[in-house]
Image (cartoon, rainbow, N blue to C red):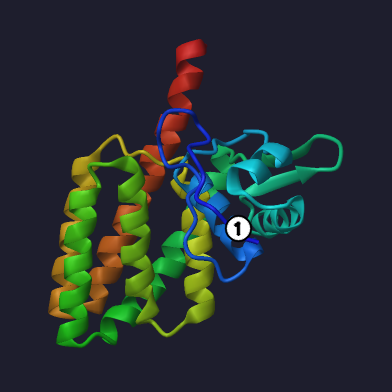
C-alpha cells in the first residue's frame, strides 16, 4: 500500500495532513494527525470522521483506528463509543496541571542537558534557537521549530523517558497557545541561548521556569477573555 501526501483538510490551502516517509502506515498516520492537532489544523473538539480522514491520507481504516487509539493514550484524542473520535479539549484546570508538570520536568531536564553540552553542542543548539525565532513569524512553522529546538536540547539530558513525557505535554498544550506577548517569549529564548553558550545550567533552569510560568499565565488569561466578552 502506498501512502500519499494529502491536500489540506481545512480547505484554506494549508498542508494539513502531509506525512513524512513512513516506517509503517500506523506510525505515518499517527504522526500526521499528531502534527495537525499540535498545529491547530484539527481544532479542539473537532469531530474526526474516520471515512474522511482515511480518504485524505490514502489509507484504510485499520491503521487510522490504531493511530487514533495511540493519540487517545497521549490525551490528544477522545474516543466515545457512541459519538466517535474527537480532538481532545483542555480546561483551565487541565492547562494549570500540564504547566505544573512542565515547569518541574523541564527545569530539571534543561539543567541536566546544559551540564552535558560541549562547545560544539552549544553552538548547534544556539543555531537551532535562532532558526526558531526566524520561523516564529509563521505560526505553523514556529510550532514545529520550537518543538525541534526543545527536543534537541532535552536529548542531551540523557533522560529519554522524561524527554518523551515533556514532548507529549508540549504537544498537548501547543495547539492552544498563541502568545499575546511575544516580546516576553523572544527575550526568554534569547536569555536561554546565553545560558546555553555559557554552560550555565542554573541560569538555564531559572530562565526556563520563568518563561513557562509567563506562558501559563498568558494562556490562562487568553482563555478567560471570551468568557468576559460574553458575560
- The image quadrant that residue 113 belongs to is bottom left
10 Å neighbourhood of mark 1: few (<14), some, or many (≥20)?
many
The relative height of residue 3 versus residue 122 in the rendered view (above or below) is above
Q: Which of 138 and 153 is in front in this view?
A: 138
**Residue 88 showing in the rendered view:** no
**Residue 102 showing in the rendered view:** yes
- Residue depicted at 71% across the width and 58% down the height: 63
Residue highlighted by disc 1: 30
Left or right placement of residue 116 versus residue 44 in this view: left
- The image quadrant that residue 82 belongs to is top right
Left or right placement of residue 47 versus residue 189 in this view: right
In the rendered image, the quadrant that contains the N terminus is: bottom right
Q: How many labels does the image show?
A: 1
The relative height of residue 222 versus residue 53 in the rendered view (above or below) is above
Question: At which x and y percent is residue 211?
Answer: 30, 54
Q: Nearer the viewer, residue 24 or 119?
A: 24
Question: At which x and y percent is residue 84?
Answer: 78, 39
Left or right placement of residue 214 versus residue 123 in this view: right
- Residue depicted at 44% across the width and 48% down the height: 174
Q: Nearer the viewer, residue 143 or 32?
A: 32
The relative height of residue 115 versus residue 14 in the rendered view (above or below) is below
Question: At which x and y percent is residue 36?
Answer: 50, 46
The outermost residue toward the right is 82
SS of the residue under disc 1: helix
Left or right placement of residue 3 versus residue 191 in this view: right
- Residue depicted at 27% across the width and 79% down the height: 114
- Residue depicted at 81% across the width and 34% down the height: 83
Question: At which x and y percent is residue 162?
Answer: 50, 75
Amino acid at each position: 500500500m502506498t501512502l500519499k501526501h494529502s491536500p489540506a483538510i481545512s480547505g484554506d490551502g494549508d498542508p494539513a495532513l502531509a506525512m513524512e516517509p513512513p516506517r509503517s502506515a500506523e506510525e505515518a498516520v499517527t504522526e500526521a494527525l499528531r502534527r495537525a492537532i499540535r498545529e491547530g489544523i484539527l481544532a479542539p473538539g473537532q469531530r474526526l470522521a474516520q471515512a474522511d480522514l482515511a480518504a485524505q491520507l490514502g489509507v484504510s481504516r485499520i491503521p487510522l483506528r490504531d493511530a487514533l487509539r495511540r493519540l487517545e493514550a497521549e490525551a490528544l484524542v477522545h474516543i466515545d463509543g457512541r459519538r466517535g473520535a474527537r480532538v481532545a479539549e483542555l480546561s483551565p484546570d487541565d492547562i494549570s496541571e500540564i504547566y505544573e508538570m512542565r515547569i518541574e520536568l523541564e527545569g530539571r531536564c534543561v539543567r541536566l542537558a546544559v551540564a552535558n553540552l560541549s562547545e560544539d553542542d552549544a553552538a548547534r543548539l544556539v543555531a537551532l534557537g535562532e532558526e526558531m525565532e526566524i520561523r516564529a513569524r509563521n505560526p505553523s512553522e514556529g510550532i514545529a521549530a520550537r518543538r525541534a529546538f526543545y527536543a534537541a536540547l532535552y536529548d542531551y539530558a540523557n533522560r529519554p523517558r522524561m524527554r518523551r513525557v515533556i514532548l507529549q505535554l508540549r504537544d498537548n498544550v501547543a495547539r492552544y497557545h498563541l502568545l499575546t506577548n511575544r516580546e516576553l517569549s523572544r527575550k526568554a529564548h534569547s536569555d536561554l541561548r546565553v545560558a546555553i553558550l555559557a554552560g550555565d545550567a542554573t541560569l538555564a533552569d531559572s530562565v526556563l521556569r520563568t518563561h513557562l510560568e509567563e506562558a501559563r499565565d498568558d494562556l490562562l488569561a487568553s482563555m478567560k477573555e471570551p468568557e468576559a466578552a460574553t458575560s
